Structures are given as structure tokens and as C-alpha cells.
Amino acid sequence: MISNFITRVKHAKVASIPIASVSGETKDRALASMAKALDLNREIIISANKKDLATAEKLVDAGKLSKSLLKRLKVDDIKIDEMIAGIKDVIKFENPVGKTLSALELDRGLELYQVSCPIGVIGVIFESRPDVVPQIMALCLKSGNATIFKGGSEAAHSNRAIFDVLVNAIEGTQGMPSGAFALMETREEVNEMLKLDDYINLIIPRGSNEFVKYIQDNTRIPVLGHSSGVCHVYVDKQADLEKAIDICYDAKVQYPAVCNAMETLLVHRDIAGKFLSEIGKRYEGAGVEMRCDDPSFKLLKDKGFLKAILHAKEEDWSTEYNDLILSIKIVDSLDEAIDHINRYGSHHTDAIVTEDKINASKFVSLVDSSSVMWNASTRFSDGFRYGKGAEVGISTNKIHARGPVGMEGLLIYKYVLLGKGDKVADYVGKSAKKFTHKKLSSSFSDKMDGIR
Amino acid sequence: MISNFITRVKHAKVASIPIASVSGETKDRALASMAKALDLNREIIISANKKDLATAEKLVDAGKLSKSLLKRLKVDDIKIDEMIAGIKDVIKFENPVGKTLSALELDRGLELYQVSCPIGVIGVIFESRPDVVPQIMALCLKSGNATIFKGGSEAAHSNRAIFDVLVNAIEGTQGMPSGAFALMETREEVNEMLKLDDYINLIIPRGSNEFVKYIQDNTRIPVLGHSSGVCHVYVDKQADLEKAIDICYDAKVQYPAVCNAMETLLVHRDIAGKFLSEIGKRYEGAGVEMRCDDPSFKLLKDKGFLKAILHAKEEDWSTEYNDLILSIKIVDSLDEAIDHINRYGSHHTDAIVTEDKINASKFVSLVDSSSVMWNASTRFSDGFRYGKGAEVGISTNKIHARGPVGMEGLLIYKYVLLGKGDKVADYVGKSAKKFTHKKLSSSFSDKMDGIR
């Protein structure tokens, strides 16, 4: 099994070379063919999914799997419609490969172009959502990357059916190389995959925090993503109370199960009394459990919030609840809020509510997170809302791509130097020629007359 | 020692927050102060260096260190002049922090800015060149990064003297935080440093291939660099012979000890006879040893090149000689050349010599290297020649930064969302507001009225 696995990864690596320079037009034809194939093969996919569902239901009944998994696992006509719509969206994107990012004349007739290109081989490791396959395959194909998929065993039949339908469509498209996409199924293969830093250039994990953390901790391959979302809202003493209530309610209650929901509310001492009693009513009404530091506990207790409040423990400050639970802390200053966020947060998304521009400016400058917000809910931090069309993931990495990542996270660049027989010896020593280092307005593709 | 080391790394991490938002003007004053301090403390630095040289000379005499190390280790007035000039160059660069990379209106009064910022804490591990300290410290300071340096024990006195002079200058500058720069000295600290992925965001290694490889293999912190430079020139059948000879001579002979020198020459069968006999004369004259595949060996032998030729072994195709040695292989096609390069090369820099635009286009598209060249010497692949002003390193990574990397390799970005109390709930459901996703021409700093 393992040797077969490595053979397929090697094939993908080989195919990563030709797929990198397939034309935009050919890639769009392959994507259209993928969308059509999903539509034509609904029955095959849904009946494969029924096998997975049947097994999963038994495990849920036996208490071995959670019920929410069934919802993620299920593929019906509506989900297939969404998969098809997602692929059609990717067709609309401009071809991201071969774009000129910079152009510089080094000397007359010696021109340097920085040109976008795919990363190479992407590894996608996901848990139980079969819809990850068409979504990521479309993005990887459009960006010219070969891709190795590894799905959860609960979705094995569904993933295999969807994968085969899509790959047949791609490989039946004239001009597309074969072997660029592979699907792995056994658990051993994940750990094998994590070792293949000679073949796989980037891993995209999709699943629970523990799952992402396991992957990050067990590979030297770069991992694009985040393992937790401990997001904060800081209500400054100069906050507009109405904005603060809107934002803090939205950030916690609108959809608490996601990484960009608020987990800790920080509030300035001078505004805490008024603000907490008002937001407390809203939270109590929504069934939010409030885990408070001593001063906020006392304050809310005195206001009569007895049912909804608890004492926060040290671990609460770094806990992602993903639920209607919130930790609350009163701070003495903006600096204390910033220090708390940088210390306990996950560098994902943090917001300040204030009418004071200097405080806002200080907050967005000093909070070391992938998204920082002034008078807006943390829930906006998302690829779709950020206008990326499709989201590869939300990254808390400090290199390559940070925050909500779209197609740009699947791309890198190469330098192309076009000369006329130029040699470095002419630019060295006493009578050395000088570099002009003059910006060019031409693009690489114009320069090459559209020849691929 | 170790606990003291970790304390200093934690201090640097803390200082990475304020240094990220120091103004460009303050950073330039600190840089000017660094340059002045080097000038005023020449004697201290040179006398510290003499201690290192004395120890190193004994080790060279005992055959424990190579003579070339002494040259790299030595600090004299000329080297100090170069360090000062290097720092002054960095003053001239624009402040790279706080630049608006993109700006998007999500909806009226809800604006998203992608703003450049430092990475955080950079780890610099280098061997025996004390001039790495001022060069990298200047670049890291200008880009707002805290930095941990670890130099070789051979240069311990020199590094400490230079480091102390520079850090005193920085920390004596009004507005600069303290503790952002630290110097480590013991060997154990390197291995400790490689484990600190919670504190150090990027490692820049400077030293031999083996040294860089060791670092890459022993840390989960991203490493910016390359461990080898197996560069190729492919002489196509459509090559202009004069250009081919100029380029192949320059790429091998002009300075063979560097990573962008050619190590393998590939030549098309149809042009091999004429080309190899001409370049062979030039190489023989320059003392280049030619390690040939069977066909090129036979060809050169028949032409009478008996002294300079040897049979290549399999390992030659992946060897970086860094010397006047060259492996030579005759290929039947452009495809064979591309396959050879992608298989045996180090993805650093590879060139084609041809007058055929279609072949050139195919080569630059399909060769998976950080720099690809058409009719130019591989030796051009370098930060200074590429107009970057200063070079952080040459990267063969497929994410973040590739090829010669300047200041841009020390930067990432954050998203800043500016709202007016906006909540996601308004954009969800039946009467959902629509996002406008309209490109903005404003910059973040204009928007914030220049408030830091």
C-alpha cells in the first residue's frame, strides 16, 4: 500500500511540471467538464454517500461519532448543486498563472520579469466533508497545482466517487496531463504524506483544531491554516455604546461555532458598568454563559445576572469555546487590552470598539493578528466577505499568506531573465558596465508574444 | 545558560511588538547612529577581531581550519568601511512597513486594507563572517523585526564587539525599544533556537551547504535560503554559438565558488561537435576539469582534449563543485534537457541558450527553478544584480519568497478592517445586504491621517 502511495505522489510531482503551464482556456474547459460530470453522475455520488451514511449512523447510535458529523457527511442534490456552483465560480476567475508581478531592466536588452506560477504539489488533508474535494480541486487546477487528497475514512465511498468523476472529467479534457490529482484513503498514508517534504510543497488541512494541530506538529512541510481562533473584542472607554453592543452581540451570537467568533470580551473599567449591564441582558437573552474575572463577576452579580455568570479560570483566557460561552475581563487601559490579546490570543482576528482614532490606530498597529478591526465584528474575517471569491483557508502563519487566503496562497513566482548573450564579467572590475535598474511597464506575456 | 538564552528570546519577542510600529524616521536615525558608532569604535572592533584571528591562525596551522576562513573572519578598516556603507544604503530605502498592498470597500463605510508589516522575530545563524551582523541587523531594523543572532565560535569576540557597538547605538536612539536584538554564543544555543517555533518566525542561515542543510533538517521554523546551487546551462541546437560560448564561460569561470555558477552543461547533440570543441579550448585554457558523459567524452577525446576530461559518474549530475570543475552531458532534445534539470538540479538558476523563441518559452515555463534565463549567464541571479539593493538570501523555497530575496522576505501583511459598528448579521438571511467589493484607491495611512 505504502509503495503504491509513494508511486502516485511521484506521478503527481511529475505531472506538476506540465500542469503548471496549461493555458487558462484549457483549464477552464476542464473545470466546465468537472461541473458537467458532477451533474451527470448525481446518482453514483449519492448512492456512494449512502454507504458512508449507513456506517456513520451506526457509529452515531453507538455513541462513537457525533451527530453533527452526519450533517457534514451527507451529500444530496442541494450539496451537489453547491459543488457545481463553486466550480463555475472558479471558471470566472482570471488565470492567475503567468502574471507579471514586476519587470525591471537590468541593462539595455537584459530584462528581469517576476512571473506568477503554481507552488507545485499541494497536499490536502481533510476530515468528513466530501465537498472539500471539488472545491479544492477546482482551485488547485485553476492555479496549476498538482494535488494529493487524503479524506477521512467516514467519507471514503463518497470521496472516491466524487474524486473519480472529477478526475475522469479532467483527464478527458484535451491538453490536461494525467496523474496530477491523487486520492489517498488509509490512515497510514497521512503519516507517510507528512514525511514527503521532497514531493509535497504545501499542506492544507481542513478539520478540527486538534486535527490541524496534529498536522502542524508532525511535518516539516509548510502548513497553511490555523489551529485555533481565540478572537477578542476590546470595548474602549471611548466606545460608542450602541456600536459596542451591536458588534459584541454579533461577534459572539450570530454564529458561535466558527473560528472568527469572539471568545473573550475585554472592556475598559470606565465604561464597564454601563456596557456590561446592557450587553449582559442581550447575552442572557441569547443563552450566553459568561465566564467573568472577579471585577466583572462582581459587577454583573450586583446588577442581578445570577444565572448566566461564572468565575473565569486562567485557562478560559486561551480557550476557543466555539459555543455560546464567553470569557469577560475588565482592563485598566488600552495597553493592558493589547498585552492580553497578544499573550492569550491566537493571532487570528481581534477588534476594538472606540470613537478615538489614536486608540484605534494604536490597537490595529500593536495587535499582532492576521486581521485587526476598528468598529466591526470579528465575524467579517472570512474569504468570501473579504472578496476573495473562494477561500483556501484562514492562515495565522507569519510568512507566505496571512488571514483569509484565496487563490493567492496557492501561487508563488519565478524570475525570468531575458538576455542577448549577457555575461556577468562585463559588470565587474575597472571598466565595469553599470546596471540601469529601470522599471519596465511591459509584461512577460507581451514580451513573449503570447507564446506558451 | 539555556534559561538565560530563552529569557533573551522572550524579551526579543516582547520587543517585536513595539519595534513593528516605530516610525521610518526613528528607524533611520537608529541606522545613522549604528553607522557612526562603527566608525567611532574601529579600534575596539579590530582589537576584538585580533583575538579571534590569533586563535584561528593556530587552528589553521594545526590543520583544523581552512585558510579561506581567515579571510572571511578578518575585520580591518576596509571591511568596517563596507559595513558602514551597507548601513547607509539601507537608510536610503523607503520604510517598507505600513504600505497598503490592497484596499477594498466591502460595503459603504466598511473598508478593508491589506497593510505590510514585519514578520516578528527573525533568527540569523551564521558561520564565520562578522560582517553578517551589521548587514542583517540594518535590514531587520528597517523592516521592524526583532532578531536573534547566533554566530560561529571562531568569530565570538568580533561578533560580540560589533553587536554591542550596534545595539548601544540603537538603544540610545530615542523611540527605539530595548531588547529587540540578541546575540547568542554557545553551540548548545543553536539547537535550542531551532526548537523555539513559538518565538522565532523565520530563520536565515548563512554558511556552507552542509550548515544550511543541517538547519533545514532540524527545525520546524521556516528557513529562508538554499542548501545547494546545482545550476545548468542548456545549449540548444538553435543556439548562437558566440552567445553560448560567452555565457558558458562566464557561468563556470567568472567566479566558480558561488551558488549561481554553472555545475552542469547540457548540449544538444546536433550542435555538440562544434560547440564543445570551441568551449573546450576556453575551458582547457582556464583550467576547468570536464567530467563528461560517454558521448561528450568520446567527442572531446577525438578532438584531442585528453588532459582536461574525465568520465562523469551518476553522482556528478547532482554535485555542486564550487570549483573549476564541470559536468557535461549531450542530450537529444529540449525535453530531455528540461527533465534532467528538474530531476538533478537544485531549483536555483538554470539557463537556455537559443535563438528559437518557442524553445526558450518552453524552457522558462517548464524548468521549475527560482530563476530561469534565456541567453544570459546564471551568474546574474543575485540580489544586487536584480536591483534589490541588499540581499537577505537566495531562496529555493516554493512559498513566501523565491530567488534572490531582499527586504520583502522580512515582511508579511495584516488585514485592517475599518467599520462604523458593522455586524455580519446584516449580510445574512433573506433581506441580507450585499457586499460591494469595490477596489479603493486610498491608502491605509491616508485614511488614518498619518496617525501611528
Image (cartoon, coloured by chain):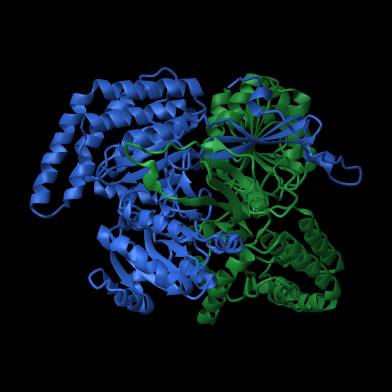
Chain colours: A blue, B green
- When asked about the image quadrant of residue B23, the answer is bottom right
Q: Residue at x 52, y 73 (%)?
A: A333
Does A78 appear above or below A329? Answer: above
Side of A290 where A420 appears, left or right: right
Q: Position of residue B259 (x, y in %)?
A: 66, 48
Q: Position of residue B384 (x, y in %)?
A: 75, 48
Side of A31 where A284 appears, left or right: left
- When asked about the image quadrant of residue B66, the answer is bottom right
Q: Residue at x 40, y 65 (%)?
A: A265
Q: Position of residue B215 (x, y in %)?
A: 53, 61
Side of A173 where B153 appears, left or right: right
Side of A83 where B243 appears, left or right: right
| Observer-nearest of B345 and A143 | A143
| Observer-nearest of B351 and B114 | B114
Q: Quadrant of the C terminus of chain A?
A: top right
Visible residue check, residue B313: no
Q: Quadrant of the N terminus of chain A?
A: top left
Q: Position of residue B276 (x, y in %)?
A: 71, 28
| Observer-nearest of A78 and B242 | A78
Q: Residue at x 14, y 35 (%)?
A: A50
| Observer-nearest of B152 and B182 | B182
Does A303 appear above or below A211? Answer: below
